[in-house]
Amino acid sequence: ISAVGQLHHPKIPDFPGANQFQGEAFHTARFGSRNIDHFVGKRVAVIGNGASGIQIIPPLQKVCKELHVYQRTPSYIFPKVRLSRAEEKIIADFPIVRRAAREFLRMFAEGALYAA
């Protein structure tokens, strides 16, 4: 079952001066065989912060000489929660704890978004 929808057709933004850029440019849907090492020490700009941007920006930030992000509307994301091995085991072993933790995060996230 394919669930790629219409998003497998990249939309390349059109903005003044884009055709004068002489560096490498590509859409994240066309990332191809590049890996993060391709960007070590380079100056990189990411246009947009959708799902692909959210995934690629953190690793790029660690290896690029400079990273610039251009966005219309900021995404509302929360820092990744780091659990200890003991906490992970408790959540894995006790489904009720897992459900309670998810419900707490859902309520917190919705409350934080609607309060803004």
Image (cartoon, rainbow, N blue to C red):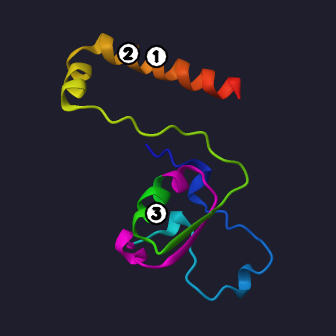
Q: Residue at x 73, y 54 (%)?
A: 72
What whole-number distance in Å separates the C-alpha atoms at marks 2 and 3?
33 Å
Amino acid beneath label 3: Gln
In the picture, the quarter occupied by the C terminus is: top right
Examine the image and state in which quarter residue 94 appears: top left
User: Disc 1 designates what residue?
Assistant: 103
Q: Is residue 36 magenta?
A: yes
For the record, the magenta segment spans 33-54
**Which SS class for mark 2?**
helix
Q: Earlier in the sequence, mark 2 or mark 3?
A: 3
Q: Position of residue 100 (x, y in %)?
A: 39, 13
Q: Local crowd at mark 3 within 10 Å, few (<14), some, or many (≥20)?
A: some
Residue 99: numbered disc: 2
Between circles 2 and 3, the one closer to the viewer is 3
User: Disc 3 designates what residue?
Assistant: 61
Q: Local crowd at mark 1 within 10 Å, few (<14), some, or many (≥20)?
A: few
Answer left or right for 56 relative to 96: right
Amino acid beneath label 2: Arg
Image position of 27 with respect to 54: above or below: below
Q: Residue at x 23, y 23 (%)?
A: 92
**Which SS class for mark 3?**
helix
On the question of residue 35 being in view, the answer is no
Furthest residue in direction right, as rendered: 16
Q: Residue at x 38, y 73 (%)?
A: 33
Q: Position of residue 68 (x, y in %)?
A: 59, 67
In this rendered view, identify the residue nearer to me: 42 or 49.
42
Contact between marks 1 and 2 (CB within 8 A): the answer is yes
Q: Is residue 2 magenta?
A: no
Q: Position of residue 56 (x, y in %)?
A: 47, 59
Answer left or right for 32 relative to 70: left
Amino acid beneath label 1: Glu
In the picture, the quarter occupied by the N terminus is: top left
